[in-house]
Image (tube, rainbow, N blue to C red):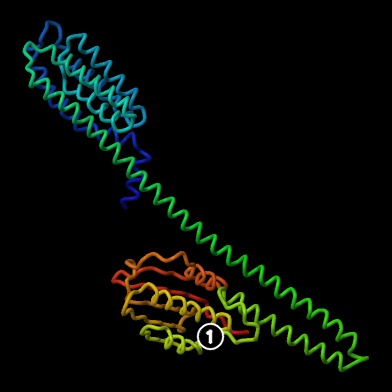
């Protein structure tokens, strides 16, 4: 709601500036009756301009203020010249002459210090000239008006400094947000590139071996059955090695690269062992029964739970407890890991990309991962994956 109002005010800044002038305009109209009753009170003959003149002078002094936001220097100049012309015509000070004070505030708020100082000196000169029309002017009266001018000027300078400070904070916050998103994209791209490069190197080599052995087996099938049998065995072993490498690279982004044997990847059956060895008290709740999820999706669920528990142990603080919930009752698998640790109060991480890795794993199966601090304390990681049947 507040954001929409703020956006509307930015689009209609002229209307907002005109509305802000309503108090000054109201005072001017309220003074009209008193002014018409003071016809014989003017300091010099001929200075009384009547009701219509009063309204016209009020209009020409206040109207330029509508453009004070972006043409503050021109507005201050026009109003100052109008006030000077009013002084030359021996017209006494009117409530509309406070327009020069409003224009002075805009100068102090938006212009450089030198121009703002010059505007303040011009306003002080206007105070002196305006009071000089009076028959008796005391020093205290001059100082009272001067203090008003200086106070408005200082208020404009303070608002200008504060506005620049707030704009600087907003700019830094936006830049930090852009950099964080950029780092996340870079991390995701780097992981995809790493997977693609290693898949190409490993799988392309193994597939090449398979093709060569298959050609040899086809050639030796009739002439040398034993040679063909050995070629088929080589094809089987090479295919198994390629499958193992693909599982490591696609399913485990930070797997130990020194292992070369065929090792089955963990799945849903290993979640109980993972919870028991997590290093913190963990409760596992399961709703429904998994309906033959493929091994890759089971590995994704296992790694998401593993990463979430690792983050809870690392950032949750002493005595943290966790809850792992798996829901297989709907059209998708819902994996939720919550803890009662420090949540939003946890110290910033050291630049790891655990959440990025979880999102990458889930996206491979059309799923999504959200991670956020809990309102009552602690942290929550929630993953949603389609309930895919194994082929």
- Location of residue 62 with respect to 165 vertically, above or below: above
Residue shown at 61%/86% (left/top)?
263
x, y percentage for residue 370?
44, 69
Q: Residues within 10 Å of mark 1 (few under 14, many from 20)?
A: some
Give the percent coordinates (x, y) of residue 281: 36, 85
Camera-nearest residue between 107 and 259: 259
176 vs 188, left or right, is left
* Depth order, front residue of 32/63: 63
In the rendered image, which quarter is residue 315 located in?
Answer: bottom left
Q: How many discs appear?
A: 1
Seen from this angle, which residue lies furthest right?
223
Give the residue drawn at x 21%, y 17%.
125
| Between 344 and 78, the one nearer to me in the picture | 344
- Classify mark 1: helix, strand or loop: loop
Residue 114 left/right relative to 389:
left
- Residue sitting at 27 percent across and 26 percent down? 103
Residue placed furthest toward the front: 258
**Image check: 92 left or right of 237?**
left
Q: Residue 322: x percent and y percent? A: 36, 80
- Quadrant of the frame with the C terminus: bottom right
Q: Which residue is mark 1?
A: 267
Quarter of the image where one finds residue 253: bottom right
Relative to residue 135, is residue 360 depicted above or below?
A: below
Q: Residue 18: image x %, image y %? A: 28, 32
Give the residue at the far bottom of this rendering. Answer: 226
């Amino acid at each position: 709601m507040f954001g929409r109002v703020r956006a509307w005010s930015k689009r209609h800044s002229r209307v907002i500036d005109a509305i802000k002038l309503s108090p000054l305009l109201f005072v001017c109209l309220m003074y009209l009756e008193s002014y018409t009753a003071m016809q014989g009170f003017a300091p010099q003959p001929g200075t009384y301009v009547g009701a219509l003149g009063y309204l016209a002078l009020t209009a020409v002094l206040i109207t330029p203020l509508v453009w004070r936001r972006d043409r503050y220097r021109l507005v201050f100049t026009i109003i100052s010249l109008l006030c000077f012309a009013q002084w030359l015509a021996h017209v006494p000070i009117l409530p509309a002459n406070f327009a020069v004070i409003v224009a002075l505030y805009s100068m102090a708020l938006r212009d450089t210090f030198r121009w703002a100082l010059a505007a303040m000196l011009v306003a002080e000169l206007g105070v002196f000239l305006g009071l000089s029309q009076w028959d008796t002017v005391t020093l205290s009266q001059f100082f009272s008006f001067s203090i008003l001018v200086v106070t408005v000027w200082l208020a404009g300078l303070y608002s200008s400094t504060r506005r620049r400070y707030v704009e600087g904070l907003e700019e830094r916050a936006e830049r930090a947000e852009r950099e964080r998103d950029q780092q996340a994209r870079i991390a995701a791209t780097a992981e995809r590139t790493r997977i693609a490069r290693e898949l190409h190197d490993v799988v392309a080599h193994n597939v090449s071996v398979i093709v060569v052995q298959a050609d040899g087996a086809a050639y030796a099938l009739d002439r040398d059955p034993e040679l063909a049998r050995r070629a088929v065995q080589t094809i089987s072993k090479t295919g198994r090695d390629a499958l193992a490498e693909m599982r490591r690279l696609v399913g485990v982004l930070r797997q130990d690269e020194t292992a070369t044997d065929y090792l089955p990847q963990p799945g849903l059956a290993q979640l109980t062992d993972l919870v028991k060895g997590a290093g913190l008290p963990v409760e596992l709740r399961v709703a429904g029964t998994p309906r033959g999820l493929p091994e890759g999706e089971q590995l994704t669920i296992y790694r998401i739970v593993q990463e979430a528990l690792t983050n809870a142990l690392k950032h949750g603080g002493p005595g943290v407890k966790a809850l792992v919930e798996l829901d297989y009752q709907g059209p998708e698998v819902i994996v939720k890991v919550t803890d009662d640790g420090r949540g939003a109060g946890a110290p910033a991480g050291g630049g790891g990309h655990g959440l990025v890795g979880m999102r990458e794993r889930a996206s491979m199966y059309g799923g999504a991962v959200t991670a956020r601090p809990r309102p009552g304390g602690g942290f929550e990681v929630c993953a949603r994956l389609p309930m895919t049947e194994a082929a």
